[in-house]
Image: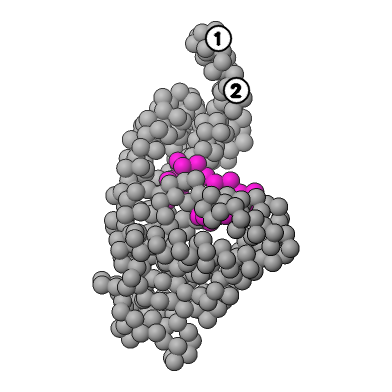
């Protein structure tokens, strides 16, 4: 039985039709990015691929292919022993490599000769990547975006988590990017994904959403750390209805000290990151902050970071870039804890029947804040 090929565009539309998606590239290639749900069965591992590449250049293609074939045969045999022996006859794998199909083709040929119905991605990962880049701008306009705005420390990420836990459609860009989207936003010990991987993660999230329901997203800038948002998503966010999450300064400081506890534990690292702000706020002020941090006065430093650095920049940017921010309903949770955010999320997601122009900011009816909902925003199932 021979295997057959499928274009990348057809593959991304029918990924659920396959029992296993197999990436036959090396571990490093797989780590950079891969198809959704793919497992990595390297035909040549990192070192082997490098060695065969060197042989190809320094000797000739024929000698490289002989040596490569011997290594590939051993690796494919090991994959079959480990992963395939218990598979039923109707198992349907999808395979791919970088572009030409030699590595995935070798694996596919053997699997097909066993009797499995094997599909090979035409053009490999390179074609998949191009299809994803083209598909994101198609998907983005389908959704009713609700943009959660709010100054640093207002609890936007906590609210998104609470909404997601209660069944709302949420895309948490900072979680996908492994970064908290500021000069101090790098998370120790957690590397950011590559740009390709970040794009694929966004695409994977988009393809799961129901266009009939709103999607909540944070008001990010064009970059989250070192990765860049798709332009179509940036444009959609900036044109969509906004929600303005507000907390008192003291609660914002407390929230940030919880979420950035690694800075409290590692004062030297905190001072090192603060040094980056010298270009924006001046050497004298940054040195004063560093001295305060070393003295344990974290609250004062965080408060001044908010009022003197983050808040002015955020408000200027949000008003300039997000068209509907000025008419955003104000959301005022009863505190900064996850419990308070969960309560707010529950009120936001109440069934239709709420008073048309009301956003509830507290459990008591007296705490209701009357606001004008942005034009086109459903006042029923969600105030956002």
Q: From the image, state whether disc 1 or disc 2 is nearer to you.
A: 1
Give residue 3's mark.
none
**In this view, which residue lies farthest toward the left?**
376
Residue at the image position 50 percent from the left and 28 percent from the top: 107
Number of residues whose C-alpha sits closer than 10 Å to that of mark 2, classed few (under 14), some (14–19) or many (20 or more): some
Q: Which one is in front, 299 or 335?
A: 299
Number of residues whose C-alpha sits closer than 10 Å to that of mark 1, classed few (under 14), some (14–19) or many (20 or more): few
Residue 31 drawn above or below residue 272? above
The x, y position of residue 180, in whole percent, is: 53, 56
**In this view, which residue lies farthest toward the front?**
284
Q: What element carries label 2?
A: helix
Q: In this view, does 229 lie to the left or right of 324?
A: right
Q: Is residue 195 magenta?
A: yes
Is any part of residue 109 visible from this angle?
Answer: no
**In this view, which residue lies farthest toward the right?**
295
> Which residue in the protein does label 2 denote?
48
**In this view, which residue lies farthest toward the bottom?**
366
Q: Which one is in front, 234 or 2?
A: 234
Q: Quadrant for residue 129, please give it.
A: top left
Q: In this view, does 2 lie to the left or right of 143?
A: right
**Split into 4 quadrants, where in the image is the C terminus?**
bottom left
> Which residue in the protein does label 1 denote?
58
Extent of the magenta region: 179-202
Residue at the image position 56 percent from the left and 54 percent from the top: 282
The x, y position of residue 155, in whole percent, is: 52, 69
Q: Is mark 1 on a helix, strand or loop?
A: helix
Q: Is residue 272 magenta?
A: no
């Amino acid at each position: 039985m021979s295997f057959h090929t499928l274009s990348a565009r057809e593959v991304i539309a029918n990924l659920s039709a396959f029992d296993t998606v197999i990436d036959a590239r090396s571990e490093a290639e797989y780590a950079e990015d891969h198809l959704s749900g793919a497992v990595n069965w390297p035909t040549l591992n990192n070192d082997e691929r490098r060695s065969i590449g060197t042989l190809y250049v320094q000797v000739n293609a024929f000698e490289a292919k002989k040596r490569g074939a011997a290594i590939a045969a051993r690796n494919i045999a090991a994959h079959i022993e480990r992963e395939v022996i218990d598979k039923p006859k109707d198992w349907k794998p999808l395979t791919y490599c970088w572009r030409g199909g030699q590595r995935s083709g070798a694996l596919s040929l053997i699997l097909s000769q066993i009797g499995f119905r094997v599909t090979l991605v035409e053009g490999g990962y390179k074609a998949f990547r191009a299809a994803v880049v083209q598909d994101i701008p198609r998907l983005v306009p389908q959704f009713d975006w609700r943009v959660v705005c709010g100054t640093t420390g207002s609890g936007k990420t906590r609210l998104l988590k609470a909404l997601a836990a209660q069944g709302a459609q949420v895309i948490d860009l900072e979680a996908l990017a492994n970064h908290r989207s500021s000069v101090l936003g790098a998370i120790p010990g957690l590397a950011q994904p590559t740009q390709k991987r970040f794009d694929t993660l966004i695409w994977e999230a988009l393809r799961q959403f129901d266009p009939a329901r709103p999607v909540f997203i944070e008001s990010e800038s064009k970059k989250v750390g070192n990765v860049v948002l798709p332009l179509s998503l940036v444009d959609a966010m900036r044109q969509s209805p906004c929600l303005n999450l507000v907390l008192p300064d003291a609660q914002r400081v407390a929230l940030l000290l919880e979420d950035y506890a690694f800075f409290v534990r590692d004062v030297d690292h905190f001072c090192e990151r603060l040094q980056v702000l010298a270009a924006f706020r001046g050497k004298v002020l940054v040195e004063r902050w560093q001295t305060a941090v070393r003295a344990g006065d974290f609250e004062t430093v965080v408060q001044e970071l908010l009022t003197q650095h983050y808040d002015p920049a955020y408000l200027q940017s949000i008003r300039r870039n997000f068209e509907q921010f000025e008419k955003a309903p104000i959301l005022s949770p009863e505190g900064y804890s996850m419990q308070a955010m969960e309560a707010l999320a529950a009120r936001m997601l109440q069934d239709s029947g709420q008073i048309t122009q009301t956003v509830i900011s507290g459990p008591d009816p007296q705490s209701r804040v009357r606001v004008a909902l942005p034009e086109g925003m459903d006042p029923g199932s969600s105030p956002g």
